[in-house]
Image (tube, grey):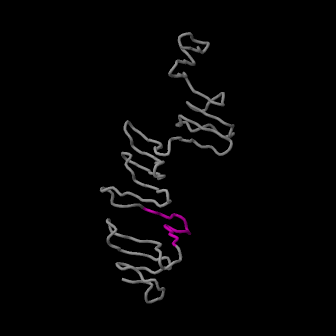
């Protein structure tokens, strides 16, 4: 055990080193002499205002900066938000290359697959899947770009089991409500009920 005193009070320490732990009494700066928060890691000075007062960890670089989580390709890594138990979660599964986001108890709410497609889970007590509100004078509330192809869909709305099609919009603009729209694009068949 090594104790480094602060030079002012012989009963307190600035740093304690043991074989299995390091205890810093105060803030820890790595690459910085005067850390902004409890732990401040600086690769280079970004020359910005001090870090947010609520931050406990600051990572600073005068360039692009990242936090990297290294795990084997059959494991998972992520960030857990906790209030005594898991409340929220951002998780990456290296085995499936999928990223998930969870709220409430950390259960999965949104999944982004390795293909880039995504799925949103709706809980039983939720009455609305989501709200998109456009507060700008111009633009879109929701814009979906589909391939301009009569064999592919820009939008499809199905039942819970994917057995029944409620509505489909083909890439060429044809719309079918209760039926699959035909491939041809004409005034007579652009909307089918």
Q: Nearer the viewer, residue 71 or 42?
A: 71
What type of secondary structure mainly makes up the magenta span? loop
Q: Is residue 172 magenta?
A: no
Q: Nearer the viewer, residue 60 or 10?
A: 60
Instruction: Give residue 115's position: percent from left, percent from top.
Output: 50, 60
Q: Residue at x 53, y 11 (%)?
A: 11
**Residue 86 lies in what quarter of the image?**
top left
The image shows residue 82, relative to residue 173, as above or below, that is above
Quarter occupied by the C terminus? bottom left
Q: Residue at x 50, y 21 (%)?
A: 20
Q: Is residue 134 magenta?
A: yes
- Looking at the image, the residue that sits furthest to the bottom is 188
- Looking at the image, the residue that sits furthest to the top is 10
The image shows residue 182, relative to residue 25, as above or below, that is below
Instruction: Give residue 12's position: percent from left, percent from top.
Output: 54, 14
Total of numbered circles in the picture? 0
The magenta segment is 131-146
In the image, taking residue 83 as reference, residue 37 lies left or right, namely: right
Instruction: Give residue 163's position: percent from left, percent from top.
Output: 32, 70
């Amino acid at each position: 055990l090594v104790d480094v005193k602060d030079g002012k009070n012989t009963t307190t320490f600035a740093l304690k080193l043991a074989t299995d732990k390091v205890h810093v009494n105060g803030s820890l700066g790595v690459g910085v002499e005067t850390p902004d928060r409890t732990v401040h890691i600086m690769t280079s000075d970004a020359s910005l205002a001090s870090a947010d007062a609520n931050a406990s960890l600051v990572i600073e670089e005068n360039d692009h900066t990242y936090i990297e989580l290294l795990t084997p390709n059959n494991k998972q890594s992520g960030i857990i938000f906790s209030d005594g138990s898991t409340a929220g979660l951002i998780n990456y599964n290296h085995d499936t290359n999928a990223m998930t986001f969870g709220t409430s108890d950390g259960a999965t709410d949104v999944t982004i697959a390795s293909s880039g497609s995504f799925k949103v889970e709706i809980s039983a007590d939720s009455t609305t899947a989501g709200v998109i509100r456009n507060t700008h004078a111009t633009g879109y509330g929701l814009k979906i770009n589909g391939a301009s192809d009569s064999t592919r869909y820009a939008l499809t709305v199905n039942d819970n089991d994917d057995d029944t099609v409620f509505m489909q919009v083909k890439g060429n603009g044809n719309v079918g409500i209760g039926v699959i729209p035909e491939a041809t694009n004409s005034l007579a068949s652009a909307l089918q009920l």
